[in-house]
Amino acid sequence: MARHGTRHTLTSLPDSNSARSSVSIIPFAIGIVIILFFYYSLTWHSFTSAFDVCVQPFCDFVDYYYPMGEAIFSTELPVKGFLYSPFIAILLAVFPSLGLNTSLFIWGILQILSVILCLLFFRRLVPAGLPIQLLFVALTLSSFPLLLNYIAGQVSVFILAAIFGSFFLYERGHRLIAAALLAFAVSFKFFPLVFLVVFAARRDTRFLMLAVIACCVFLLMVPGALLGVSDTLGFYGVLLEAFRESDWVVTNPHSQFFPHLILRFVNVTGQNVHGIFPLLHWITYGVVVANMVLLFLVQRARLKHANLWSLQILFLTIPFFLKTSWPHDFFFLSFAQALLAWQFLSGEAPDGEKNAEGKFSYSKTLQKRIPSRHRKLNFFLLLLSIIASNVVFFNLFDNFLGYGFIGFLFWADLLLLIATYVELLPPTLHALAYPHRFLNTKNKSYY
């Protein structure tokens, strides 16, 4: 990752050594878009015909977001099915004055712009060469979660763009705007609060304070000023009640939350599911704790690209703590897949050592410590994950309900999580065992 002050031009890509490339990504990206659009046009008569979820484009916008914008300054309470903060409801109030058709057009443009931002942020965050950058473009634009997000007009792509933007700006020292972007992501769905763990692991109390203040501004102060304190608290009260009454999610075939997925399988066998439910929750807690420990170890070991790996770990933890985990919540899969592909193909271990001149350089020694059979296994896991979460596989499977019931997206996530552990544990433990050989722990700009 580029250090502070380093910039890449919009028409060039950093290669695997963070050097500039003279090859522009734009023509290749446009080619990928054309190929995928041609494939989609041959496969479906319309996007909405691909899934048994919407009778019209952006159905969630029509059913929840647009009505919420109409109601926010009249009832001051969330409409049924709206589970986001009053800050987002206030922003949605812009649309009703434009009319539904114009609002749908603008919402579609916002969706497309958010995807473009995600692609640009990935290019700036991950110092990979042209093949990996194009792989991310292809994986993103053929991602089942992303396509479902677009069809339903959901907000997951906005969350991803905000998280990417927050980490990008943080790495370049713009902490205030980075904190505001993270708070913006939190105002959609509250689970992005978990990304504060990265900054807690870095012991960056200044950023944590800025993020907390930004969240208070977005979630409390702005709604309190525009709606009134009592109406804001009433809004949150209705949200909490809606969350308490969400037991129906447990049996929904599209929920990819780990306990829900296993319960579906157990229920098919006719076994008693009540006794196993607490055990499944304890397993999820154990996975979350293990992932947080790995994240702290990665930061403590000062691995190369520690923040990128931390971002990877947190993304892959989502289906173990987000109790809905709808398919569009897996918006991060293409990022996690491309990051691992870059790791496999770069031949570069995520550790750092001093060279003969006393300067820090990155070696390939750790690659040799990971048995080749493990690396082959990891590549196989990555390939399976890409297949399971891709639209092409979904079309071949040709069963929207069955696709969710089996939990292909959860398994795609789990495969990446296993591969991430295999990649990170050896260099992390080695760096902690030999701290004098690795990056200076006083250096806080590592990424």
Image (spheres, rainbow, N blue to C red):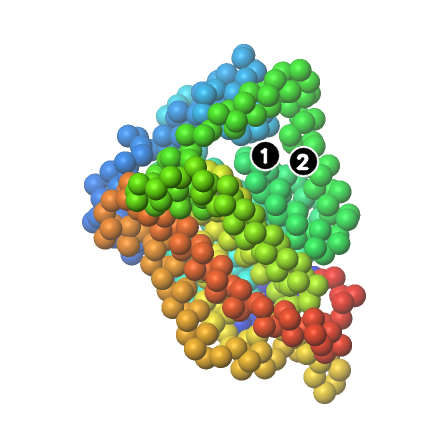
Give the position of the N terminus as an image quadrant: bottom right
Measured as percent of width and height from the top left, residue 298 is found at 64, 63
Q: CA distance from mark 2 to mark 1?
A: 8 Å
Any part of residue 114 in sight: no
**Which amino acid lies under the numbered mark 2 shown in the image of this protein?**
Cys
Does dot 1 land on a helix, a strand or a loop? helix
Measured as percent of width and height from the top left, residue 350 is found at 59, 71
Q: Residue furthest bottom?
A: 356
Q: Quadrant of residue 250?
A: top left
Q: Are marks 2 and 1 in contact (CB under 8 Å)?
A: yes
Q: Quadrant of residue 308?
A: bottom right
- 26 horizontally vs 209: left or right: left
7 up-or-down from 153: above or below: below
80 up-or-down from 373: above or below: above
Measured as percent of width and height from the top left, residue 421 is found at 53, 64
- 226 horizontally vs 31: left or right: right
**Which amino acid lies under the numbered mark 1 shown in the image of this protein?**
Ser
Which one is nearer the viewer's eye here, 362 or 271?
271
User: At 63% across and 77% down in the image, what residue appears?
Assistant: 362
User: At 39% across and 42% down in the image, what residue appears?
Assistant: 263
431 up-or-down from 222: above or below: below
Q: Quadrant of residue 176?
A: top right
The residue that disc 2 covers is 215
